[in-house]
Amino acid sequence: MTLALDFGLSLPVRLRGLEIVLYILGGMLLARLISWVGSRITARIDANYQHSDALVRTEAAKHRHALAQVITWVAVTVVYILVTIEVLRRLGFAVSGLVAPATVLGAALGFGAQRVVQDILAGFFIITERQYGFGDVVQIAVNGSAEDAIGTVEDVTLRVTRVRSVDGEVITVPNGQIVKAINLSKDWARAVVDVPIPSVADLNRVNEILRRVGHAAFEDARLRPLLLDEPTVMGVESIEVDQVNVRLVARTLPGKQFQVGRELRVRVAAALQPEGIRVTPDVSTAGVAPEGRRRDEGEDL
């Protein structure tokens, strides 16, 4: 009689334990499935870009990629919350009875986790306003940090933004701590090349050479797809004691301004050298030479 009673009592307990295990396993499998589907969608978006003739990602593709990442993260979070509620019910906790304690706990967490809530709200507006997306080159000013986070966006969720720098470092920035985000690859970009010229040089001749360089770059079959129009000589940007900075600018495809800028600098240096115009290094107004000695009055720059 006692054995039968013990068996009758242990059977519901075993069934309840089995249900809990099945809920946990089912939730983990469903979360894995959602993550797999999300990765497949983002991989397809990337494949469409890589297999196309487009040199840069469209704004719509960046937004779809970021949106797929956010939806995946939210769906996985919802699955874990629902599984937790069902497990608590199987353990005998009345979910309706947890409303009052949950309200108090939520208020306490609201005060203690203000930054988390702030991060999620900021991430929501980043996604909906399309401030930046996957693949964008950004410069992010972070609250409390002296240095900006500069690099390519690799991941955007409601809570954090992950940026990979040119050195390969992955920088994780909480969305709520972002003070200012500069998108360097939205719609179009601009390559700015400041050419330091000795103050004794003929500026009209220099401007003519730079115009020829811009025209030749625009006619180059390799650079033409990256340029939206012919590079323009803006003229003298600044005047210092022994040098003048002449600015050359070019509108480029988003994210290609660095490549175009490097190519233009090479062409400018190569064009000025045969003309006997030497591009000066950056010097201070005090005229201190790199070796630490003071320049003589007649020393060549």
Image (cartoon, rainbow, N blue to C red):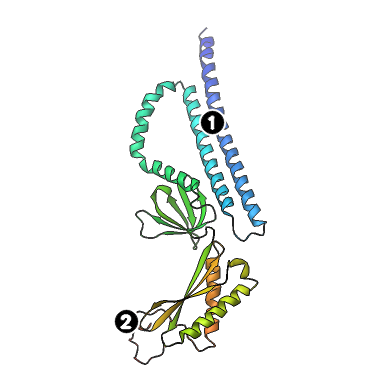
Q: Residues within 10 Å of mark 2 (few under 14, many from 20)?
A: few
Q: Nearer the viewer, mark 1 or mark 2?
A: 2
Q: Disc 1 to disc 2, how far (Cα)?
A: 71 Å
Residues at discs 1 and 2 in contact (Cβ within 8 Å): no
Residue found at the very far bottom of the displayed protein? 298
Give the labeled residue for mark 2: 286
Q: Where does the image place residue 217, in percent across and percent down from the top left? A: 59, 75
Residue ID for mark 1: 24
Query: Vertical placement of 125 versus 296: above or below?
Result: above
Residue 175 vs residue 25, the one in the foreground: 175
Q: Residue at x 50, y 85 (%)?
A: 205
x%, y% of residue 57?
59, 56
Disc with the residue nearer the chain's start (1 vs 2): 1
Q: Which mark is residue 81?
A: none
The amino acid on which the numbered mark 2 sits, given as a three-letter code, is: Ala
In-front residue for pair 36/211: 211
- What's the amino acid at mark 1? Ile
- Badge 1 element: helix
127 w.r.t. 250: above or below: above
Q: Residue at x 62, y 67 (%)?
A: 225
Q: Residue at x 67, y 57 (%)?
A: 52
Q: Secondary structure at mark 2?
A: loop
